[in-house]
Amino acid sequence: MISVDKALEQILGAIHTLGLEKVPILDALGRVLGQDVTSDRDIPPLPNSAMDGYALRFEDTRGASREKPAVLTVVDDVRAGRISKKTIRRGHAVRIMTGAPIPKGADAVTRVEDTEKDGDRVRVFAPAKKGLDIRPAGEDVKKGELVIPKGKVIRPAEVGMLAALNRSDVTVHRRPKVAILSTGDELVDLGGDPAPGMIMNSNSYSLAAQVAECGAVPLRLGIARDTREDLMSKFEAARGADLIVTSGGVSVGDYDLVKDVMGELGAMRFWRVAMRPGRPLAFGAIKGTPLFGLPGNPVSVMVSFEQFVRPAILKMSGFKNLFRVTVKALLKENLEKVAGLRFFLRAVVEWKDGKYYAVTTGEQGSGILKSMVKANGLIILPEDVTSMKAGDEVTVQLLDRSFETASKPWNP
C-alpha cells in the first residue's frame, strides 16, 4: 500500500501529453492551444473613430465654446466599412460614425453631442485635442505580435480573437479517448430488470460524466462478467483508447480479476493506496495503454477518479493546472478517523461572512452515492490526524464552486 502522494507521482510520471490536431475555432473552446498564434495584420488595420461625431483638424476648434462655436464645412459623411476619399483641409470636417476610418488630414474627432449641424455646416462647441477619440492602427493587435501563446486554454475571448485574425481553425491538443468498463456478474445496465441481489451499473455513467467534464471523450464498453475470457474480450475492444478506466474487480475476492489480467497483458505499477474511500486501486498499463483499476463502490469510484484519473486526463490534454482548487474551511462538527489513511469526506461547503465552512453530508459509507450528490467539496484529513473538532481549520477540495456565485452581478 502506497501513499496518495506517491501514487499520484507515479501516475503523472507515466502519463504523456497527447499530440495535436487542427479543429474549427468553436470546437477549440475549453481546449489547450498547441501552437503560438501570431498576428499577420494590424487590428484595427487603419486609424478609426472611437465615437460618432466629426473628424476634423484640432487647430480649427481652438477656443470653441457655446457662446463662440467653431463653424466648419461638412465635406463628406463616412460610416464604418467605408473610406472617405476627401482630405480634411482647413475649415473642413467629415461626419463620421464609430469604427469608420479617419479621413486624411484629420487629427481629432469631436463627439456629436458637442456639435450642432446646420445644413452643410457644423457648429463645434468644445475645443478638440490632437488625437481625441481616434483609435490608432494596431491599437488592439500589431502585425507580428504573439497574440495567444501555446499552452493557453481557449476561452470565448480567444475564440473571438481568432475570428478577428481571420482564423477559421486552430491547432490544439487532442482530446483523450477514455474507455470505461464496469466489471461484475451482479451488474445490470439501464433498461434491465434487476433481480434480487443485482445492482444497476451506475459506475459506468458517473465515470462517463466525469470523463466528459474533463473535456475527454468517454467510450463506454459496457459490463465485463467475472470471467477471464470476457474481461480479455472487453480489453481488446478498448484498443485505440488513450486511457482505460475500470470499476470493480481489483480487491482480493476470487472473482476480482482485473489486476491479474493487467499483469498478464501489461504491467501493474501499484495496487492499494493509503486512502479512504478508494484503497483498492490499481494502476498500470495494458499493451502500452495506461489503465486505472478503480474500486467497485460508487463513492470510491468517484473519489478515486477525482484524485488520480482527472489529473491524468488533464495532463494528457495539455493542461498545466491539473488539480481542483482547495481552500481552508472551518469545520462545523467533530470528526474522528483512523491513523495511516488519508480521508476524503464528502462535504457541503458554504461561504459566509468572508470564510468557508464545511460539514459532512452525513453517513460516509463508500456505497452511499447520495453523499456525492449532496457534496460540493471533499474534506481532506491527513494520514497522521485522528480527530478534528468543530471550529478547527481543514483543507477542502472544491468539486463545485457554484455556491460562491453572487446574487448580484457585482458587489460594490
Image: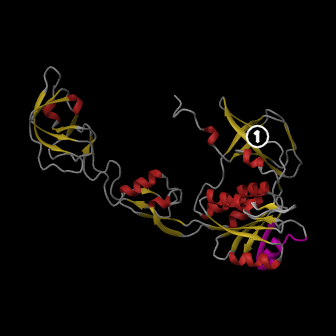
- The answer to whether residue 127 is above or below residue 363 is above
Is 105 or 307 nearer to us in this picture? 307
Q: Position of residue 328 (x, y in %)?
A: 71, 39
Q: Badge 1 local density, few (<14 within 10 Å), some, or many (20+)?
A: some
Secondary structure state at the residue bearing disc 1: strand
Locate the N terminus and report the quarter of the image it occupies: bottom right
Q: Residue at x 49, y 53 (%)?
A: 155
Residue 216 lies, in percent from the top left, at 61, 62
Question: Does the stretch in magenta take in 341?
Answer: no
Q: Quadrant of residue 196?
A: bottom right
Query: Which is more toward the observer, 307 or 363?
Result: 363
Taking 159 as reference, is 188 above or below it? Answer: below
Residue at the image point whose x is 88% and y is 49% from the top? 339
**How far across and down, in percent of the image, does residue 35 sit?**
47, 64
Point 49% across, 60% down: residue: 28
Q: Amino acid at mark 1?
A: Val
- The residue carrying mark 1 is 394
**Which segment did they paint magenta?**
254-270
In front of the other: 135 or 168: 168
Q: Is residue 367 visible?
A: yes
Q: Position of residue 49 (x, y in %)?
A: 25, 42
Q: Is residue 148 rendered to the left or right of residue 331?
A: left
Q: Is residue 129 visible?
A: no
